[in-house]
Amino acid sequence: MLVEIKNVFGKVIYSSETTSLKECLENAVKDSADLYGANLSGADLYGADLSRANLSRANLFGADLYGSDLSRAFLSRANLSGSDLSGANLSRADLYGANLSGANLSRANLSRANLSGANLSRANLSRDVKIKQPPIQLDAIKYGIIIFDAHMKIGCEFHSIAEWYGFDDRRILEMDGKGALEWWKRWKDPLMAICKAEGRS
């Protein structure tokens, strides 16, 4: 059947003969279609491969993106509020100014994602992690770093700031070997100073 993707104004921006919107969207990405402003509100995109997709200003309100690959996707100013992004790969995705309020980001890979200006109010990183303040993001060093209200993500490791402060050498070695320990010894104090200065604990 012919499946169409429309923009927020109702104009068809891509169509293909497929069985689902998910397949149509994946085809659009493979064809390098410009999906700027696509209206995908409430769509079931579970496990979709959307890496490198241009979804700038797209409406993904309430969409199911569980386990999807959005690595290197362009999602600036997209509406992702209330969407399920648990387990999604958002590494290096451009989420500048995106609305992620109330989104489920538990187990999502946010390494080196651009979250500057993103609205993360009420977003969930796990069942017990809530976000009230804009995250602090540092990407110019070996591991991508995102500092939340009381948690910090360094590379793929996500722990409370208190846990990071208390980790011994053995625990850091377990994360990524000798290089990680050398890096942590150099950056622990500056990172903890940033957390303290910005009222993150």
Image (cartoon, rainbow, N blue to C red):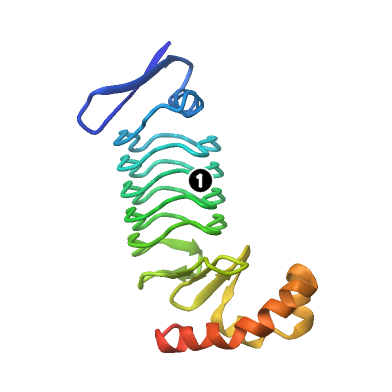
Residue 183: image location, x then y, percent: 68, 77
Left or right: residue 164 compared with residue 130: right
Mark yes or no: residue 135 visible: yes
Q: Quadrant of residue 33?
A: top left
Residue farthest left in this picture: 9
Which element is circle 1 on? Answer: loop
Q: Is residue 58 above or below residue 110?
A: above
Q: Is residue 89 above or below residue 157?
A: above
Q: How many numbered circles does the render carry?
A: 1
Mark 1 = which residue? 72
Residue 150: image location, x then y, percent: 48, 78
Q: Is residue 137 above or below residue 14?
A: below
Q: Quadrant of the N terminus?
A: top left
Residue in front for this viewpoint, 82 or 116: 116
Residue in front for this viewpoint, 104 or 192: 192
Q: Write the residue at 44% across / 34% down.
A: 44
Q: Write the residue at 47% across / 84% down.
A: 194
Q: Write the residue at 54% across / 41% down.
A: 68
Q: Give neighbour class at mark 1: few <14, some 14-19, many 20+ (Cα, 10 Å).
A: many
Residue in front for this viewpoint, 141 or 8: 141
Residue 25: image location, x then y, percent: 44, 28
Q: Is residue 70 above or below residue 1?
A: below
